Amino acid sequence: MLKKFFISLLFVMVPHLSGATEVALDDVVRTLETPFQQQTEESGKIQDFQAEFVQESHIASINRAQRGAGTVKFKFLFSAEDSSPVAKFRWDYRQPNIQEIISDGQMMWVYLPENRQVIESDISQINEQQGENPVTFLSGLGNLSRDFHIDWGTTHTDESGNFLLRLKPRGDSQLIQLMELVVNKDAVFEWQKQHKSGDKFPILATFVTDQQGNRTAIEFRKIQVNQELKDELFRFKKPADVEVVTPAQMTF
């Protein structure tokens, strides 16, 4: 799917999906936001999701591509005080190196076993310093139209009929200049028919370009939602020989 995703973004195509013009941009945006908003009925919310992912990155400064793969899990905590849920997450990379990126919704840990160090950061400080972060942006799916200017991609659909969107941050972001999404067509059609899409995770792939021109594409596979993921999955368990450091303590 990644190859199709790149092709869809780089070339102008005739929309493949019959009846694609009947789907308004607002339908696609609402499909993305509604499962992650406090006011949505419980039956229409996505409480958690897990998937395998494949990642392809292009580093502009050295013109080098890198491939990664692993598993991702998110758990969303809804509360009456917040318009969008607090997100717990973990990205477990198997390639190109073993790496864990874990958050309990307040702190984030980045652990590379070969370094015997874990970098511990406050999530609120990450958001303040970096703006929209590709690692954490899934935490704000309920407020996408608040945080981003959203429009159609170069075409409305890819070869499979899934919908393509372009998002530009409304505020300053060190890490995102442009983000493009592939949105699950089945979730969109379900939203059109029933005004709910909580049993299908709406994002199939993301494509992020940062301020330096680096590009990262992530495709989600074997997606499952509402599996009642346990809270302990989102707590970092520090091995005895691992040093905890903060970003300020790191030297380059």
Image (spheres, rainbow, N blue to C red):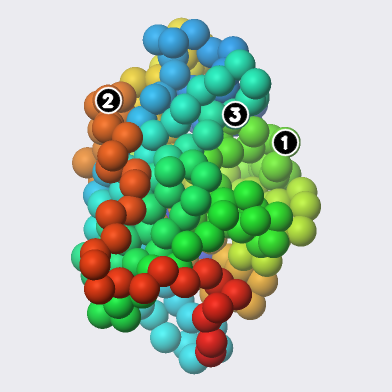
Left or right relative to 88: residue 106: right
Q: CA distance from mark 2 to mark 1?
A: 29 Å
> What residue do we see at 36% from left, 73% from top?
243
User: Which residue is the site of mark 3?
Assistant: 84
- In x, y percent, where is residue 223? 27, 38
- Amino acid beneath label 3: Ser
- Amino acid beneath label 2: Glu
Q: Judging from the image, what secondary structure is the residue with disc 2 in?
A: loop
> What residue do we see at 62% from left, 65% from top?
175
- In x, y percent, where is residue 148? 69, 44
Q: Nearer the viewer, mark 1 or mark 3?
A: 3
The quarter of the displayed image where residue 117 is located: bottom left
Q: Label for residue 241?
A: none
The quarter of the displayed image where residue 94 is located: bottom left
Asked if residue 185 shows in the view, the reply is no
Left or right relative to 145: residue 157: left
Q: Judging from the image, what secondary structure is the residue with disc 1 in?
A: helix
Q: CA distance from mark 1 to mark 3?
A: 11 Å
User: Which residue is the site of mark 1?
Assistant: 146
Q: Residues within 10 Å of mark 3 (few under 14, many from 20)?
A: many
- Taking depth in this image into account, of 110 and 172 the one nearest to the observer is 110
User: Which residue is the site of mark 2?
Assistant: 228
